[in-house]
Amino acid sequence: MNIAPASPRRWPNSPVTMKLEAPLPFGSTIGILGGGQLGRMMALAAARLGLRTHIFCPDPQSPAFEVAQAHTIADYGDLGALGTFARQVDVVTYEFENVPSASAQFLEEHLALSPNARALEISQDRLKEKAFLSGCNIPIAPYAAIDSRLSLDRALQEIGLPAVLKTTRFGYDGKGQRMLKHARDAGEAYSDFAGQPTVLEGFVPFVREISLIVARGTEGQIAAYDPAENVHRNHILYTSTVPATLEEPTREQALRIARLIVRELDYVGILGIEFFVGEDGTLLVNEIAPRVHNSGHWTEAVCTTDQFEQHIRAVAGWPLGDPARMADVVMQNLIGDEINRIPDTLGEHDKPHNYGKAEARPGRKMGHINHVRPWRNI
């Protein structure tokens, strides 16, 4: 692979969106916003490729700090600290979608940000995300914006029950949402989210949940992984099984939707897409995540190029790798003190990953284990 030296970056005063003009050479530095397990795994992947990483995170105990060459401890909204950070790196990416959009736009005016600020802004707000998907004619659940108790009552009459009331921002692992099974549930749910913008979604009957991890490079090349079938416990992802139980037309539809989304967003990097699968095989998109994704951790154990390496290759302007799968696998999240059971329960074909977090708390993702099911004995 021929990698030319990175082109010198301008430092404009006017709002100009910067893009990577050439593949990054070995020794270049990738800035990562966020210092959790996803940032850590991206940093490890970058190191294997001969690239350095600089983590920007407000948490002084961030596990990603242990494996990066540099780190900055500052708030994501601190433009002064972000400016200094931007001068020390060659490209910026992020591990989660709750980075302030103003900070993302600020960075994008100074150097390449991948995925771009538009993708971040859309995915971090459920209403913007749904408007984007609807505009692309991608099937989603019925929804309505809620800005008052009266608007909630009207939306319930139109959408019906059961339904789910969600905050438009900062919701993950079941946080920021309430199931409404009866009309009497509306008042309490609305009060719980008082002062927060919310959206009402119609509850969608489904037989399974799947996700698809897709990558797009700087030259527009696309590589998609096999869909994973997901099971949640207490609103937290518990397992991702590959292959998923899907008919081929449903699998092809998921791939078509994934390709459409990354093209419409002019996307660079890994994108996670969550779907509901109906009894007849029809798909509805639940949400998109502009980053490496928990349900893609299985790729570490059984793919030619895992999602973390793929993301780094994409944001560095390198050619994408082969996403081919070489075995079946079940990825299991390790929550709380489950991480401590690894030494006693590890099987012959198990591949564990400890995130290096300081404290095992209930509901906290501490690691994962990939239970590999080889296609043949070697």
Image: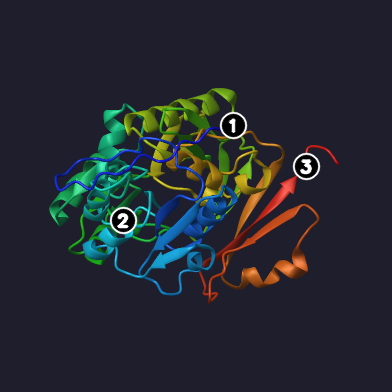
Classify mark 2: residues with Cα within 10 Å, few (<14), some (14-19) or many (20+): few
Q: Residue at x 60, y 33 (%)?
A: 322
Closer mark to the observer between disc 3 and disc 1:
3
The residue under label 1 is 246
Provide residue 308's location: percent of width, then percent of height.
Answer: 53, 47
Q: CA distance from mark 2 to mark 3?
A: 46 Å
Disc nearer the start of the sequence (2/3): 2
Disc ID at residue 87? 2
The residue under label 3 is 374
User: SS of the residue at dot 1?
Assistant: loop
Provide residue 232's location: percent of width, then percent of height.
Answer: 53, 54
Q: Nearer the viewer, residue 357 or 294?
A: 357
Q: Amino acid at mark 3?
A: Pro
Q: Amino acid at mark 2?
A: Arg
Q: CA distance from mark 3 to mark 1?
A: 20 Å
Residue 68, above or below 336: above
Q: Residue at x 16, y 44 (%)?
A: 15
Quadrant where the C terminus lies?
top right
Disc nearer the start of the sequence (3/1): 1
Q: Nearer the viewer, residue 183 or 119?
A: 119
123 relative to 71 in the view: left or right: left
